[in-house]
Image (cartoon, coloured by chain):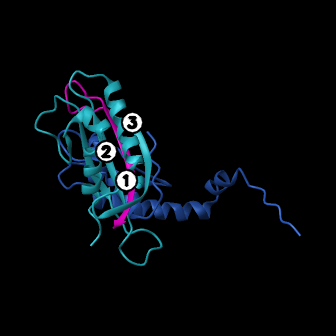
Amino acid sequence: MIVDGPAIVRAHLAAESAVTSIVGTRITDRTPDSVTNPWVALQLIQAPQADNIPFDYLVPFTFQIDAYAGKGQSQAQANLLGRVLRASLNEMPFTTHSGAVVTQVRHLSFRYLPDTDLDPARDRYVLLTTVVAHNA
Amino acid sequence: MSTRFSRNVAFTEEMEHDPEFMLGIAKVAGALARDVRMQAPRNSGHYVGSIEAEGSTVFTTDVGAVPIEFGSVNNPAYAPFRSAVLAAGLRLEDHP
């Protein structure tokens, strides 16, 4: 069985004080009950089998990670949160994880994309990141 | 004995003007469009029907495509375009 990529990333971010100082425990795969405070939305986009590996062991997990600003906050807060997330993810290959080894982290994009389903539109940075991992 | 390699800086442009190459790319784009439709959410109105391939481009004309691709507070990021590209084994470069 392959490693649980979303659980590893969520646990890693939840253990990073730079992240929790902004969002607390609001690292979620769905919209939180309250959208007043900033939050992180983590969603798995794809997890194919790695190229050139004859068995399903090494998996490149591609995530969309949304850095939402809090209500009434500026774009700067979302930008800061996005950059903090990016820096925290960069530490994953050098960090010990429960039951998993992260070999590589690669950011495919980092874009400013306000969420217009909220009124007024909420500032959001969208990070598209691939985390390559296997079982420990 | 030595060999000198000179990079052809116009390679991409030349390939884009090669009818045979573009025919092959159009087939890939058509297959990719089908994959995007398969990855699209079923309850998204006209979205699935709006996905088209034209030449080397796959696109949608649906005005609701951004929240479908990137999600919002009301729905997850279904990411049909990005999922299809990754599932096809193509290199994804996501440019804002």
Q: Mark 2 points at which residue?
A: A65
User: Please, what secondary structure does the residue beneath circle 1 have?
Assistant: loop
Question: Would residue B33 be visible to someone looking at this image?
Answer: no
Q: Where is residue B35 in the image (x, y as percent from the top left)?
A: 34, 62
Query: Is-magenta flag for residue A79?
Result: no
Relative height, residue B85 to residue A68 (above, below):
below
Q: Nearer the viewer, residue B14 or B19?
A: B14
Q: Which residue is at the far bottom?
A: A54
Q: Earlier in the sequence, mark 3 or mark 2?
A: 2
Characterize the local packing of mark 2: few (<14), some (14-19) or many (20 or more) Cα atoms within 10 angstroms. Answer: many
Q: Name the residue under label 1.
A: A95
Q: Position of residue A112 (x, y in %)?
A: 37, 33
Q: Mark 3 points at which residue?
A: A83
Relative height, residue A116 to residue B8 (above, below):
above
Chain A color in figure: cyan
Q: Are marks 3 and 2 on the same chain?
A: yes
Q: Which of marks 1 and 2 is nearer the N terminus?
A: 2
Amino acid identity at mark 2: Ile
Check the picture and name the quadrant holding the C terminus of chain A: bottom left
Marks 1 and 3 in Cβ contact (< 8 Å)? no
Check the picture and name the quadrant holding the N terminus of chain A: bottom left
Q: Which of marks 1 and 3 is nearer the N terminus?
A: 3
Characterize the local packing of mark 1: few (<14), some (14-19) or many (20 or more) Cα atoms within 10 angstroms. Answer: few
Task: State how far apart marks 3 and 2 are (Cα).
Answer: 11 Å
- Seen at 27% across and 45% down, the residue is A15
Chain B color in figure: blue
What is the chain letter for disc 2?
A: A
Q: Give the magenta-colored segment's residue range.
A: A114-136
User: Please, what secondary structure does the residue beneath circle 2 have?
Assistant: strand
From the image, state whether disc 1 or disc 3 is nearer to you.
1
Amino acid identity at mark 3: Arg
